Image (cartoon, rainbow, N blue to C red):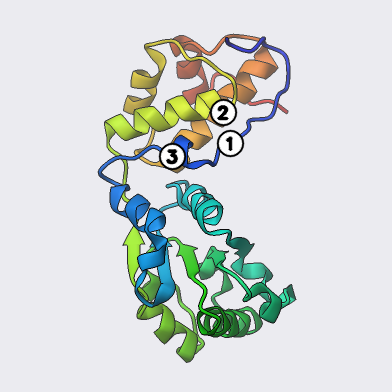
């Protein structure tokens, strides 16, 4: 049932496999994640725009494989030999462009994980060849890794994602709300996430239900966000 207005409940994002919505734009990536034991060289690069589902699929893979998940920017502070004793997922690799220490740590992690017979998943936005890694040995190893990309969603997938985002926040939208939002927001998962968060915050602040007219007011900046 819809939650009562006025309760500032945080959104809880469901990250299980059953919660990941499969469509033509992501079906290949889902198949590769589920068949991770067949990865060429026991490693995979997963790319896609912000909010496209990379983190969700990373958690799905971790659940399937028992992998540990870490942020690339944190690698220089981690015990690499210990981390390499199992499957590992490293998120947001492009964020360490220009960070020599983190890149060196990732290079050693890459080699140790594979030497130990485990699997490695690397994620980031854009093609891996554009990640601007300036450690040549690391860049060449990543460039030689099989990659799969999450693509821009179609209307059906974007509708399903919006429905899931509302559900994560315990909100039941009116039937005309999601079709309206699809016509008004950018065609991206990030835009879907941002509008649902904005609507939730404005609804709580104004103590008003999220209707189509209310969404129009938020989109036109006629309803202030929660402070």
Is 181 in front, or is 120?
120
The crowd level at tag 1 (other Cα within 10 Å; few <14, some 14-19, many 20+) is some
Find residue 20 and name its label: 3
Please report the residue visible at 59 percent of the width from the left and 20 percent of the height from the top.
Answer: 170
Circle 2: element type: helix
Q: Does residue 60 sit above or below 110 in this rendering?
A: above
**Which residue is the site of mark 1?**
13
Is 26 in front, or is 199?
26
**Which residue is the site of mark 2?**
168
Dot 3 or dot 1, earlier in sequence:
1
Dot 3 or dot 2, earlier in sequence:
3
Q: Does residue 207 sit above or below 25 in this rendering?
A: above
- Say which of marks 3 and 2 sits in front: 3
Q: Does residue 195 sit above or below 112 in this rendering?
A: above
Please report the residue visible at 55 percent of the width from the left and 56 percent of the height from the top.
Answer: 62
Dot 2 or dot 1, earlier in sequence:
1
The crowd level at tag 2 (other Cα within 10 Å; few <14, some 14-19, many 20+) is some
Image check: 81 left or right of 17?
A: right
> Is the C-beta separation of discs 2 and 1 under 8 Å?
yes
**Residue 49 locus on image (x, y percent):** 41, 53
The crowd level at tag 3 (other Cα within 10 Å; few <14, some 14-19, many 20+) is some
Question: Could you tell me if residue 48 is visible in this image?
Answer: no
Circle 3: element type: loop
């Amino acid at each position: 049932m819809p939650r009562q207005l006025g309760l500032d409940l945080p959104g809880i994002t469901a990250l299980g496999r059953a919660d990941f919505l499969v469509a033509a734009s992501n079906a290949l990536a889902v198949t590769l994640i589920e068949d991770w034991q067949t990865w060429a060289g026991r490693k995979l690069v997963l790319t896609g725009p912000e909010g496209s589902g990379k983190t969700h699929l990373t958690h799905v893979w971790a659940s399937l494989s028992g992998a540990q998940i870490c942020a690339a920017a944190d690698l220089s502070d981690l015990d690499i030999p210990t981390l390499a004793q199992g499957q590992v997922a490293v998120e947001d690799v492009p964020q360490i462009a220009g960070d020599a220490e983190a890149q060196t740590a990732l290079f050693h992690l890459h080699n140790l994980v594979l030497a130990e017979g485990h699997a490695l998943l690397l994620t980031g936005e854009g093609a891996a060849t554009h990640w601007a890694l300036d450690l040549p040995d690391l860049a060449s190893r990543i460039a030689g890794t099989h990659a799969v990309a999450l693509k821009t969603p179609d209307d059906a997938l974007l509708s399903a994602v919006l429905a899931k985002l509302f559900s994560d926040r315990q909100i039941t939208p009116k039937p005309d709300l999601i079709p309206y939002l699809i016509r008004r927001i950018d065609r991206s998962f990030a835009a879907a996430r941002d509008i649902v968060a904005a609507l939730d915050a404005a609804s709580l602040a104004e103590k008003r239900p999220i209707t189509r007219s209310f969404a129009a007011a938020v989109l036109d900046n006629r309803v202030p966000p929660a402070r």
